[in-house]
Amino acid sequence: MPKTIAVLNATGNQGSGLIRALIAPNSPHRNDYKVRALTRNTTSPAAQELQSTYGPSQLELVQADVYDVESLRKAFEDADGVFAATNNRIPGKKIETEDEMRHELVAGWNIVDAARDCDVSHTVLSSLPNINKASNGRFSKVFHFDHKYMIEDYAKKQLKAITALWPALYYSNVAWPQYCRTLEDGTVRFCAPTSGDVQADWVDAAYDIGVYAAAIFNKGPTTTANKTYPVVSPKIHFSDLARIFESKTGKKAIFDPISLDEWGSTVAAASGKGYEEDIRQMMEWVRVAPEEKVCYGTMESGEDRSWKELGVRASTFEEWLDRSGWRGPE
């Protein structure tokens, strides 16, 4: 009997990546699963595309809203597993105050409560490390990290079996102007506000997280319960982004960082003033995080059991460029 996996935000990058990893035609385990694809709007073009891609025999569209716990209970009923990735942004709305960032906690607690009430046997959360703790309180407002960690901590106390994924910086972030811009002469300027010598780990969020989550469901809670797996590529310097991009695409590229003030104001203009200090402190931590550790400097490299236990690894920047076809900001 195939297992039913309820996938929240099924039309998003992480949700759709897991669906592909579980039931795409080339998936070795496609006959082992059925997907319950949860979305706020089952009639949206993205939802309908999912349905047409995988067919009703393997994918069922179900309406659910993370701010409506009763809809989640209905969606999780009789599911064998749940995958959840909470969103720090509010769809269609800017975040004007820091207090509004707490909406993610509400969504996460609702997901956990519904999974507990439905006796779900295995929940996989896309989470992040606690930067307040890692920095010894120096950076206490990286809410889009710390709130996910708080949800993870709550889940460990409430659920039968929970496995967490901690993804690195997203390669797809380079599509945002705070990370990368195209100059008038066509040069691609990678511009995150840090020294080019600073190292970080990265991930293809639309691909790697789904691959890791699928491997976790395949291994089951006996192997993976109450464990955290970092989804991280080998570290590269920020300046390497320009070097690798130019080598792969033939387009001229440079690394030339903007100021931290411009970084914060650029993000605030797109996402809201309430997000500005959060994203500033995140980058301040990236600049000083211990380079000998992985996943934002929060985990010893020996603690990464992803390859040994799951047989998976995260994509390199070269692989992401090939897969995505990205050739610089429009």
Image (tube, rainbow, N blue to C red):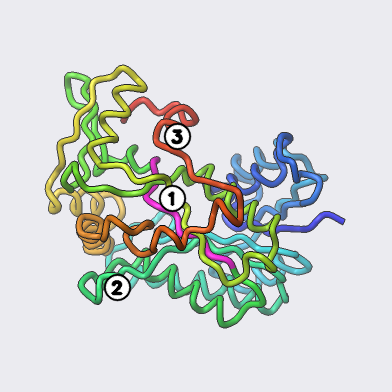
Q: CA distance from mark 3 to mark 1?
A: 13 Å
Looking at the image, the residue that sits furthest to the right is 1
User: Hey, what amino acid is under mark 3?
Assistant: Trp
Q: Nearer the viewer, residue 222 or 83?
A: 222
* The N terminus, quarter of image: bottom right
For the point 45% across and 34% down, the residue is: 320
Residue at 68% across / 67% down in the picture? Answer: 221
Q: Is residue 173 left or right of residue 222?
A: left
Amino acid marked by disc 2: Asn
Any mark on residue 320, and which?
3
Residue at numbered disc 1: 232
- Image coordinates of residue 269 in percent, x first then y, are 24, 50
Q: Earlier in the sequence, mark 2 or mark 3?
A: 2
Task: Where is residue 152? Give x, y as percent.
Answer: 50, 72
| Residue contact between numbered discs 2 and 1, judged by CB atoms under 8 Å | no
Label drawn at residue 132: 2
Disc 2/disc 3 C-alpha distance (Å): 30 Å
Q: Earlier in the sequence, mark 3 or mark 1?
A: 1
**Range covered by the magenta-colored residues:** 163-171
The secondary structure type at the circle numbered 1 is: loop
Q: Residue at x 25, y 41 (%)?
A: 238
Q: Residue at x 24, y 54 (%)?
A: 268
* Main SS, magenta residues: strand
> Can residue 40 be spotted in the picture?
no
**Residue 10 vs residue 157, the one in the foreground:** 157
